[in-house]
Amino acid sequence: MAEVKLFGSWGSPFSRRIEVALKLKGVEYEFIEEDIYNKKSPLLLKYNPVHKKVPVLLHNGKPICESLVILEYIDETWEGPSILPKDPYERAMARFWVKFLDEKCFPAMWQACWSIGEEQEKAKEEATEFLKILEGTLSGKKFFGGDSIGMVDIVANFIAYWFMILQELAGFELLTKEKFPKLNEWMNEYLNCSIIKENLPLKDKLTAVFQARFQAVAAAAAAAAAK
Amino acid sequence: MEDEGVVLLGFWSSPYVMRVKIALEEKGIQFLYKEEENIFRSKSPLLLQANPIYMKVPVLIHNGKPICESLNILEYIDEVWKDKFTILPHHPYEKAKSRFWIHFFDKMIFDIGRRMWASKGEDQDAAKLEFLKSLKLLEEELGDKPYFGGDQFGLLDIALIPFSCRFYTYEMFCKFSVEKSCPKFMKWVNKCNERGSVSKALPNPYKVYDFVLEVKKMLGIE
């Protein structure tokens, strides 16, 4: 039995975060692909009964859930490049920003892509506001983590990859070079890191899945409007 | 920001602020407490400077640098004042479990807490049931241990206990008894309340109830 197992999904940014962290630390693991939209495995439901979501890390038979919790666990358990800074104040700042990313940025950006009309405009405004705040934190830094990628960079994966694909499909451009020069520079550096590059889902595959979902959403909206 | 040693910006009824007060007390750290008296109407310039993004309490200011978000503050306190009373569990797996349950509870109470005192009818009932379901999950996590931290009062205990001062309020609005539904949880609450740090930090539950009545009036909620 492998000592480390990861229950994840090929297309999930949360799942990919954990793969990056494990690879950064040189940890060997068994990846178990979960069909999160259609049928979750009995093991996933056993190891994450509260949320029933991926990712779940299983280490020596003990499950750890929630991507931010797993990232801290990985950093505390294995030697190798640090995911969180060493200084307590810098650690507190990193934790602040990852929470900001997951609780504010991600939902607003996701909503901006999937909603329509007024709701979408409002979401786009909110997302822009949050991205401006992030842009501000990158002053003079190559990565959020400084010279090398850290927890904030790992958690911001959604912005650099998933969102860029989604916004194009949704037909708008929020993250322009003009409005967000530093974020755009960061995205280039980030996507060029081999550890990031080699752990992203295939663009064509992801695009196809998102496209199908857009079509389904549009069809449902049309059906609702026709009633 | 000036360096005034350790400063805590707070509001008396915030359980998130109470978490920090308890932690500082357990660690024996001297601090200056600044109450945001007018938090609903106008936040102080210091708060707006220290926490410009969320504009919320608690904020810990240490050596002139602000740390926001209660869980971050607890971890920071534990990392800086290492030699006095350890808050976080020692083992990474236990740390992970504590963090997981705090995230779970915080997300739940943010929505459910408000619905229990602000909404009515089916929505309120559903919130009450969700709340009790969550307490039962926590009871399972507690098991036979005296504290969530085992023999020692720790991170998860500190994070959860402040909300006990709101139980009377929830019970009054939703017509139930935490004691009756979750006796094990109440036993833990009572044990925590024996600690000086907790009894110092938590306000009188009746005062909390009166305050919620005032807030409802101010917000125009029946």
Image (cartoon, rainbow, N blue to C red):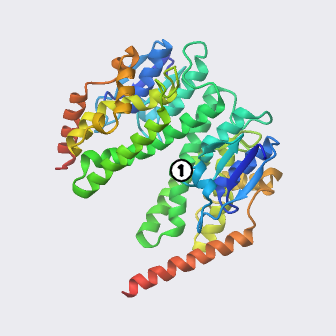
Residue A36 locus on image (x, y percent)? 61, 63
Q: Which residue is mark 1?
A: A49
* Residue situated furthest bottom in the rendering: A226
Residue B173 locus on image (x, y percent)? 21, 43
Tell me the quarter of the image containing the C terminus of chain A.
bottom left
Residue in front for this viewpoint, B150 or A112:
B150
Q: Who's the residue at 81% across and 57% down the image?
A: A198
Q: Who's the residue at 47% across and 18% down the image?
A: B24
| Placement of B22 over or under A171, stated as above or below | above
The image quadrant of residue A137 is top right
Residue in front for this viewpoint, A53 or B208:
A53
The image quadrant of residue B42 is top left
Residue type, label 1: Pro
Residue in front for this viewpoint, A47 or B8:
A47
Residue A179 locus on image (x, y percent)? 60, 58
Left/right placement of residue B108 relative to residue A149 reads: left
Residue A60 locus on image (x, y percent)? 72, 39
Left/right placement of residue A52 relative to residue A81 reads: left
Q: Who's the residue at 56% across and 80% down the image?
A: A215
Crowding at dot 1, Cα within 10 Å, few <14 / some 14-19 / many 20+, comes out as few
Determine if residue A181 is in view: no
Q: Chain of mark 1?
A: A
